[in-house]
Amino acid sequence: MMSSIVIRKPLIFKIALFISLILISYLVFSRPNYSPSWIPHFDKLAHAFSFFILTLLTYYAFKPKYYLIMAFLISYAIIIEVVQSALPYRTASLGDLIADFVGISSFYILLLAHKLRNHLKRK
């Protein structure tokens, strides 16, 4: 029973990643109809959080080397900004790209801290 859960776990992350990519793509390409002005820099926070989650899901779905995840997600972030620059109701933003990179980097910083903590516990 336990081995079937372990085998299916990457599949769950792959499905979640696929759904997240569709949802995030829809949100970044659709006409914005929200403006939570009560949250400063909401757009940048949303970008960082989205790319943190995408990094986490990609990591657990495929376990590739960090540079492959970063290359894939940074390419996706650049594509988002290029497409947004072509949409009349959206604009491209270097700040959004930086927020995306912060989200990706944050995942790896937390992962490294977690691994370091576990390593120190074992000693």
Image (spheres, grey):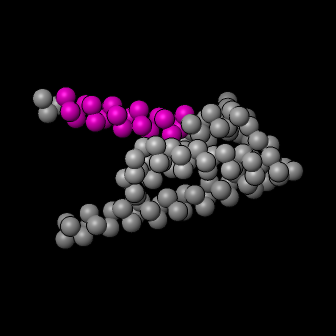
Q: Which residues are magenta?
A: 102-120
- Residue situated in front as seen by the camera: 58 or 35: 58
Q: Is residue 101 magenta?
A: no
- Residue drawn at the location 40% of the way across and 57% of the way down: 62
- Residue drawn at the location 40% of the way across and 51% of the way down: 64
Identify the image quadrant of residue 123: top left
Q: Is residue 33 left or right of residue 118?
A: right
Where residue 102 sits: x, y (%)?
A: 55, 34
Q: Is residue 36 left or right of residue 10?
A: right
Q: Is residue 43 visible?
A: yes
19 over 84 or under it: above or below: below
- Residue situated in front as seen by the camera: 74 or 102: 74
- Residue situated in front as seen by the camera: 107 or 76: 76
Q: Is residue 80 left or right of residue 3?
A: right
Q: Is residue 107 magenta?
A: yes
Q: Is residue 45 visible?
A: no
Identify the image quadrant of residue 94: top right
Q: Quarter holding the N terminus?
A: bottom left
View extreme (right): residue = 88
